[in-house]
Each structure stands twice: as structure tokens, then as C-alpha cells.
Image: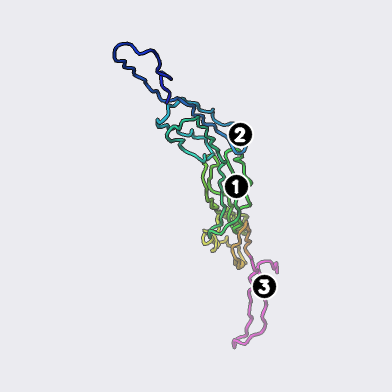
Amino acid sequence: YTPDIATVSGTMPAKDVEVTVTYTANAHKLNVTYVMSDGAEAPDAVEKTVSYGDDYSVTTPDVKGYTPDITVVEGTMADEDVAVTVTYTLDKHTITFVDEDGNEVDVEEFDVTDPDIDEPEVPEKEGYDGEWGDYDTEKLEDQVVEPIYTPITYTATFIDCTGTILEQEFTVESKDDVATPPTATEKEGYSVTWPSYEVPNDDFTVEAIYTLDKYTITFVDEDGETVAVEEFDITDSD
């Protein structure tokens, strides 16, 4: 404290003398300085005048993507100036890419100053196109990203003697739709069948097989005994 009269002095008169000395609390400077650990631009410093013995409290301003080492500068004013430095540290976050089973594929680190990341390749899954699910590096938090798979659409083509009779789309999840071929067009003098096939994870074509039918003419005598047997088909002219 500082008195308003440093020394009470004078010549004593012929009566009592009464003097009041008043003490005033000393005022001191409170300086709060902000520093970024990575050299980025920091908030402006705060300077206040605070009387000795008074409480002070200065809330540290929020800076997106950084964490201060002191969130509130507070205390009781000493009989001297007070200087406090608040240091902000850059927050680091991760995006973890996992496969369908939750196994880690890659981990990418980002922060508010460098939000760009390199996506890893999506794990392959037969019969599917894959892409990574949504994530947002504007959200300054750790994130886990899973793959999203979409069945690839293929086409099964069935051909008989008249040409293409069916083009059927299918996916790896709907192979049963093309596991049984359609009814082929009949052709006089021929038997028609479809070859056996397994449905692949790809476009495929199946062609009907036409087999020439063979017939016989059996010549017999009066007693029913075979005299001759002649074979013919629809291509024979005689």
C-alpha cells in the first residue's frame, strides 16, 4: 500500500493535533501473452491494471485446432507486476481406415493447418466396387472410416438359333436369377440343350447347342424280318 502522507511533520500548536493518513492499494500490471508452439498467429495479448490483493481472472481465448496449457489465468494480485505466458499446442488427429472386419488398413494424421490426407486403396472384394465411407477433416476429432461396397452389375446373354433371346442383368448377390437358362427356340430336326455353366463375376454368354436328330427307316418282309435299316436326318435330300 502507499500512504497519502509519507511523513507527518510540523510544529505543535497549543492544542491537540489529529492527522489521518490514508493508504491506497498499489496498482500493478497484469500482462497475459499468448504464444503458438508452431509459430502461427496468436491472439492479442491482454493487459490489465489490478490493485494489490484483488482477484483477477482472464479466460484464454479459444483457437480452433489448438489447446492452451492454461485455460484461465487467475490468482490474487501480488505487490508487483504479474506476467503470464499461455502456450497453444497444435492438436493432432487421426483418421483410421479399416476393412470390413475392422482390421486396420491405414492411419492418416491431420490437423487444422494441414487437413489433406492420402487415402489408401480400398481392399478388394470380388464382385463389388469399393469406396471409403464419409469422413471430414473439418471435424477436428479422431475418426474411423469403413469401406462401402456396391455390387457390380453384369450381363448374362443367352443366344439360340434365332439370335439373342435374353440379356439379363445380375450381381454377385443375385446369381440365381441367371443360373437357369430360358427356354430355347426349337429347330425342326434338331434337339436343343444348353451347355452347363457356372455364373462368373463377370459378363458372360451362353449359346444353345443344336444336335442333329437321326431317324431310321426299317424295312421288313412279310414275316416281319428286318431286311434293311436306313438312317436319315432333316439334311438328307434322298
Q: Amino acid at mark 1?
A: Glu
Vertical side of 215 occupied by 141: above or below: above
Residue 192 at least partly seen: no
Q: Residue at x 63, y 58 (%)?
A: 204
Residue underneath mark 2: 40
Residue 202 at least partly seen: yes
As helix, strand or loop, the secondary structure at mark 1 comes to strand
Q: Position of residue 183 (x, y in %)?
A: 54, 61
Disc 3 crowd, CA 10 A, few/some/many (<14, 14-19, 20+): few
Residue underneath mark 3: 232
Q: Mark 1 and 2 residues: CB-CB less than 8 Å, in contact?
A: no
Q: Position of residue 93 (x, y in %)?
A: 55, 46
Q: Earlier in the sequence, mark 2 or mark 3?
A: 2
Asked where in the image residue 17 lies, by quadrant, the reply is top left
How far separated are the C-alphas under marks 2 and 3? 96 Å
Q: Position of residue 38 (x, y in %)?
A: 62, 38
Residue 234 falls within the magenta-colored stretch? yes
Q: Residue at x 64, y 68 (%)?
A: 211
Q: Position of residue 71 (x, y in %)?
A: 47, 38
Of residue 81 and residue 145, the one placed in the foreground of this image is 81
Q: Residue at x 55, y 38 (%)?
A: 88
Q: Amino acid at mark 2?
A: Ala
Vertical side of 117 occupied by 20: above or below: above
Q: Which mark is residue 138?
A: none
Residue underneath mark 1: 109
Please state which of the two labelled residues, at mark 3 or mark 1, is closer to the viewer: 1
Residue 82 falls within the magenta-colored stretch? no
The boundaries of the magenta stretch are: 209-238
Q: Earlier in the sequence, mark 3 or mark 1?
A: 1
How far separated are the C-alphas under marks 1 and 2? 19 Å
Q: Amino acid at mark 3?
A: Phe
